[in-house]
Image (cartoon, helix red, strand yellow):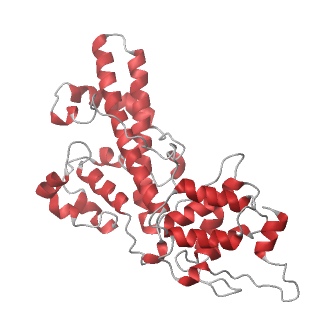
Amino acid sequence: MEGAALIGYIPLPLRCRAAWLHLSYTIVAHAQTWSLWRAEEEAARNDTSKEQAVFMRQNSGAAVAQHMLARLMVVEELVAWNYQESTPGEECVRALNEWKVRWSRDWFFGATYDDACANGQKYLEADPISPQNKAFLEDDWGLDGNDKALLFPPDDLSKWFDGEIEGFEALFKKTLKKQAIAYLSKPDQYVDMQHNDTATLPARWHEGQKPAPRFWSPFMWNWAAKGKLFIECYIRNDFSTNAMQFLYKALTQNPPYTRFEQVLQDVNALMNVVSKTHDWSDIEEATQQLWMGEMTWREFVNYLMDNYANHLPLGARRTSERKDPDNVFDTFEARLLLEGY
């Protein structure tokens, strides 16, 4: 937790790292292009230059929204991803795969699935994340080395990860702006297919809008990353078979949570992974009752499992708590009621 904000994590498979960085870089590139064309629009000295800058800014903005929507879809899929159900090295993030294929084949604006099947079925059948298929997906681009290199993120993250690509503004003023203006002098179908005056943005098209994705907490990330076993009690660290064990560990960690939002983040993220249906306001109300001592731990466990995760094995309700035979009041449930949370 940093200040009033909660830290959130996304469980990204290692094999998808390059595609994820590529998507993020593409957003940065289009956003910076949009900003540069906006500056050109403001500095324009005649109507023609202004109209050209407006057109290019609008096209850049349409691209930003499209790629950010794609990333939101990827994030939503990842935070709900149950990593125990996939084989390491063979993970498939469907939204990311679709983005990579669409980007590689220029199928973002105006291209339907039927168009893709008719014009490039072989590309739909390839794994777009595999490095072995990179050359195949880009086989007919017709770009020189410099133009092609600009489309991919530099290996050094510091050159673009903060939101601006190093050297991009200078390249824009020297080359890219002139190329774009020359391109507008010979318009074709592609020029008109990005920005649409009648189009409206979805209610949510990026991660900063509410409701926010159910990001994993630092504890959830660390718990999942520890591996298959708890050394002290030999319980697998997976959410499907040990859902309540995860929450028990989250609520008994040291130092403890001090804010209701921290507890709710773990509950929401867990239910997002293991549950097939959700009533988020209902889950929040039950968590609030636990936090305020209006619901016991056992009641809370049974409520979540019965209403949202009854498809999980019976063992998912159990925890590794060890009761003191000499003190029947020294239990996790009693501590929650007597000490508060």
Q: Quadrant of residue 68?
A: top left
Q: Position of residue 80 (x, y in %)?
A: 47, 63
**At x 38% / y 19%, what residue is drawn?**
41
In-image side of 132 versus 264 (left or right)? left
For residue 293, above or below residue 102: below
**At x 50% / y 67%, what residue is drawn?**
273
Q: Position of residue 30 (x, y in %)?
A: 39, 39
For residue 203, above or below residue 135: above
In-image side of 178 versus 310 (left or right)? left
In-image side of 83 versus 117 (left or right)? right
Q: Position of residue 154 (x, y in %)?
A: 44, 51
For residue 223, above or below residue 107: below
Question: Can you name the residue that lies furthest to the right here?
Answer: 326
Q: Is residue 161 visible?
A: yes
Quadrant in which the C terminus appears:
bottom right
Across the whole image, how many numbered discs are drawn on residues? 0
Q: Position of residue 266 (x, y in %)?
A: 62, 62
Question: Can you name the residue that lies furthest to the left here?
Answer: 118
Q: Could you say which is closer to the camera, residue 85 or residue 160? A: 85
Q: Quadrant of residue 15?
A: bottom left
**At x 76% / y 73%, what residue is drawn?**
333
Q: Could you say which is closer to the camera, residue 233 or residue 195? A: 233
Question: Can you name the residue that lies furthest to the top here?
Answer: 46
**At x 63% / y 60%, what residue is drawn?**
286
Q: Is residue 153 visible?
A: no
Q: Could you say which is closer to the camera, residue 212 or residue 323? A: 323
